[in-house]
Amino acid sequence: MLVAFSVSPSGGDNPDASVHDAVAAAVHVVRESGLPNRTDSMFTTIEGEWDECMAVVKEATAAVAEYGPRVSLVLKADIRPGHTGELTGKLERLESALSRHELGRSQERRGITSGATGSNGSAASEGTAGPEGTTSSDAVGRK
């Protein structure tokens, strides 16, 4: 399971309303957990089993609570039993899909499309050549 979450305090006495110290406390909890994780400017994503992930979210929320009387938590989960390595696997599949999309767009710009005729007037083979010898028609429906 993947859990992306954002946790921040509100109502504290920081005059510039900055929450970076509180967020740092939460990220420290995540990194100490040992779970695979990634932090960007909006969310921290962790990967693990339900109980592991929820325990980390709870502990990170408690760490942030030290910085203000109120805490906001936004959480999104991708629950997919039997799958691991999705923190990087989903991105790898996305990059692969983008490469296929960009290849198709490049071929369209050059006039290489399904059903087009070649320079000798013969019909081109069905689909367009893609990565690793596949054709665009092979890629349809592939996940």
Image (cartoon, helix red, strand yellow):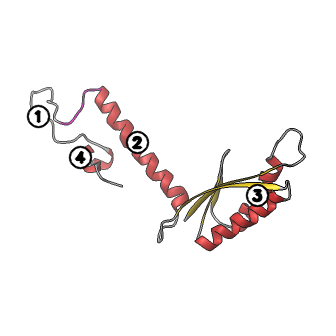
Seen as rendered, the residue at the extreme bottom is: 51
**Which marked residue is nearer to the observer: mark 4 or mark 3?**
3
Look at label 1 and name its amino acid: Ala
* Residue shown at the point (80%, 57%) measured from the top left: 64
* Mark in the foreground, 4 or 1: 4
Query: Is 15 situated left or right of 42 in this image?
Result: right
Q: Quadrant of residue 32?
A: bottom right
Q: Which mark is first along the chain, 1 or 4?
A: 1
Q: Secondary structure at mark 4?
A: helix
Q: Residue at x 33, y 46 (%)?
A: 131
Q: Which residue is mark 1?
A: 123
Closest to the observer, 5 or 30: 5
Q: Which mark is residue 137?
A: 4
Q: What residue would you read off at disc 2? A: 99
Mark drawn on residue 26: 3
Mark toward the start of the polypeptide (4 vs 3): 3
Labels 4 and 3 touching (C-beta < 8 A): no
Residue 72 higher or lower than 126, as above or below: below
Disc nearest the viewer among 3 and 2 = 3
The mark nearer the N terminus, 2 or 1, is: 2
Q: CA distance from mark 2 to mark 1?
A: 26 Å
Tag 4 and tag 1, C-beta contact below 8 Å: no
Is the C-beta separation of discs 1 and 3 under 8 Å?
A: no
Q: CA distance from mark 4 to mark 3?
A: 46 Å
Type of the residue with mark 3: Ala
